[in-house]
Amino acid sequence: MTSSAQAVPTANAMRRALRRARDGVALDATEAAVLLQARGDDLADLAASAARVRDAGLEAAGRPGVITYSKSVFIPLTRLCRDKCHYCTFVTVPGKLRREGHGMFMSPDEVLDVARRGAELGCKEALITLGDKPEDRWPEAREWLDAHGYDDTIAYVRAISIRILEETGLLPHLNPGVLSWTDFQRLKPVAPSMGMMLETTAERLWSEPGMPHYGSPDKEPAVRLRVLEDAGRSSVPFTSGLLIGIGESYEERVESLFALRRVARAYHGIQELIIQNFRAKPDTAMRGMPDADLDELVATVAVARHIMGPAGNLQAPPNLVDGEYARLIGAGIDDWGGVSPVTIDHVNPEKPWPRLDELAAQSAAAGFELRERLCAYPEFVQRGEPWMDPRLLPHVTALADPETGLAREDATVEGRPWQEPDEGYIAPVGRTDLHRTIDTEGRTGDRRDDFDEVYGDWDDLRERAKPGMVPERIDTDVRAALSQAADDPTKLTDDEALALLHADGPALDALCRTADDLRRETVGDDVTYIVTRNINFTNVCYTGCRFCAFAQRRTDADAYTLSLDQVADRAQQAWDVGATEVCMQGGIHPDLPGTAYFDIARAVKERVPGMHVHAFSPMEVVNGASRTGLSIREWLTAAKEAGLDTIPGTAAEILDDEVRWILTKGKLPAATWVEVVETAHELGIRSSSTMMYGHVDQPRHWLGHLRLLADIQRKAEAKGVEGFTEFVTLPFIHTNAPVYLAGIARSGPSTRDNRAVTAMARVLLHPHIPNIQTSWVKLGTEGAAEMLRSGANDLGGTLMEETISRMAGSSYGSYRSIQDLIAIADEAGRPARVRTTTYGPVSEERSAAAHASDGHLPELLPVLGD
């Protein structure tokens, strides 16, 4: 059924909906569907109210009476695609490309020729459009990529974007179709903006034979919505929109608009919506379908304006409106999109772009001044980081008016270096003694005030977090579950495991005894610990983890970055007092190149060759790989060559995206965490594993997390490689966490939760992960001793300094001496033994050095004496 074939709404329904639109009342879905059918005087009424909403938004944005466009070149990087949309003439097949004398992809020379011609005429945007993952369908595409040294199409998009930036100065706007979260990390450093049309959320248009998107895997609505969300999580200014008239109903069209609004409000990353009208084309399956008429387009633009509100940016392609510019302006658009004086619209080649002087005249006739913008909208240009990657800022600022964020009329479009020099990238900045003064002086009194910008929409998060605020209870036969755990824990069902995760009172005591017996049987009575030093080399981070109080902006009083010499000095100090390991992690600093991690590992190994480098969380690995353009495997291989020995399995939080996207805005999804860890294991780089719990999670999430870790370890064992060294329980520290201060998370786990998680970690990970570590940093002496009686066998390390938990609000200090750790073991009635990172024995020389200093750094002795 097409939208034009549906029943006409009653006059009363139309009058009521129009009145609510005039009054500025938020429309519901039913009212919006009615208004999509407005025609004649009703449509004029609707358009007028929409225009008023648009005008209020332009006034608030500081550009009243301005309609924008982007002067661009259109670069169809490849017309091959794995999808089969029934209306598309952009996509072709390898044989036709060959007959026309084209390669499977445009060559770099062809791309740069177009870009240079655009730069000569003052264009500032290079719109790069291509089919989705053509190598998955066409062997010829894979052969071309292999022959030119690219792992996949995204790698070529990244490489060609860098050449455009460096050799022409144009700003790439990328439309490569469906992207993964990792793809966004790879492409964000090379493009100020990206885009992908949602088109529609109507599932039937994708799933049913004969429908326009049938046979096109990348057109599944849920997949495309996930892309929009990942763009927001990655702080990428993103263009999306609707293709109307392809068979969707009015209700489905409204559903699509509301879906776009939900994503825009949650992540603030949708920079504009394009409302594009279907135009039938010869030689397509939909050639006989009628075009979406102009009234339909005008009504959809007006309804979209009411739904998206004054802050939304709306665009209608000027070459598809049959010269009716005034009607679209009158319906609430504020942008004409990309217009090229050089290239055709390769998606709609039969529809030429209007001349810019004509577009300016038509806009002026409607009372608007036509102004040029960049591919990223002014709001995002002016926001800067994290929306603009630091590597792109010189390119963007060279073309942007600093006062308005629009394109600068007198800008010279010329190539500029993209890759900053690796040498001298890191220098001591800020409060670099925070590791010590966090315990003596505390934090500064200031707090960042950009929560909404960095973390997203709190109201949306509160709604999504409601089910997890209070753990649900489950009624199952706990006695039978306890019996199974004691008899053979590997045969526990999920229902039995959940029952035990909810255990309390005598049942919890029995569970902890069972876990403790299993611990004794598996690893013996020794409580192990390691003499180590934490080196958090920077706390500058723009990821947007909503639980993190460690992350700072460059300008925050507590922000710091260590130099390579300072990192090496700290490693040397640790070695001198008996350490066998340094654990190094840092914020995702926007200025750090991906090779910085190699330099940090190398600096430690060059200064202290015998030191074990335990460093770089999976999030840091992905950041490094994205910034260097390497695959995760290639990056880890290079890191290992630079001196990396093992990686911490942090950044895991809860390995369930339902929880992760409440806790974090831009952090890696669960599948990517797993990919990093499994790849590291295959390369001989072992890792720890962790779980942070007690926030918006529930016991079912704990169960899923632990099952997944056990499965990863089983896979490693099947491949004959060593995997996880240990599992570390990380109770959520709520005190300074934004997600708690916003009223979303609960105030950390209870003692019952800590005991149940520790005991069930022992039970569910048996026999695959034999070492269960508890955190004295988060639990203190008594709490850690209790966990040692509940299945744990390891206390972690002396640390010597610890910043992350202390800045979050932990009150148990940032270091422990060897005697302190032995005392915790004594409290649990067990002997203590020093270990290496991989739970091996420590040499007599290292052990003697550690005991001689008791694990104290000389610089901390006065503090420890206080």
Image (spheres, rainbow, N blue to C red):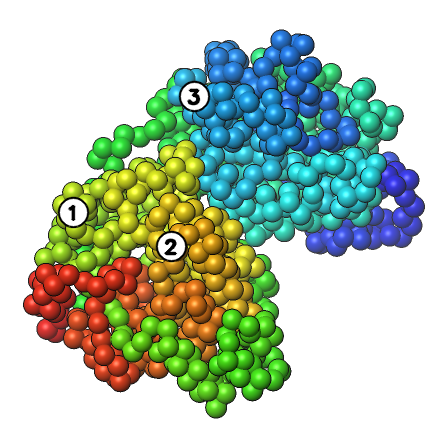
- Mark 1, mark 2: which one is toward the viewer? 2
Q: Residues within 10 Å of mark 2 (few under 14, many from 20)?
A: some
Tell me the amino acid under the disc marked 3: Arg
Q: Residues within 10 Å of mark 3 (few under 14, many from 20)?
A: many
* Residue at disc 2, secondary structure: loop
Query: In the rendered structure, are the residues bearing label 1 and label 2 in contact, judged by CB atoms less than 8 Å apart?
Result: no
Foreground residue among 172 and 631: 631
* Residue at disc 3, secondary structure: helix
Residue at the disc numbered 3: 163
Q: Which comes sooner in the sequence, label 3 or label 1? A: 3
Quadrant containing the N terminus in the rendered view: top right
- Mark 3, mark 1: which one is toward the viewer? 1
Quadrant containing the C terminus in the rendered view: bottom left
Label of residue 809 in the image: none
Q: CA distance from mark 1 to mark 2?
A: 23 Å
Q: Position of residue 343 (x, y in %)?
A: 60, 14
* Residue at disc 1, secondary structure: loop
Residue 156 seen anywhere in this rendered image of the structure: yes
Label of residue 722 in the image: 2
Q: Residues within 10 Å of mark 1 (few under 14, many from 20)?
A: few
Residue at the disc numbered 1: 609
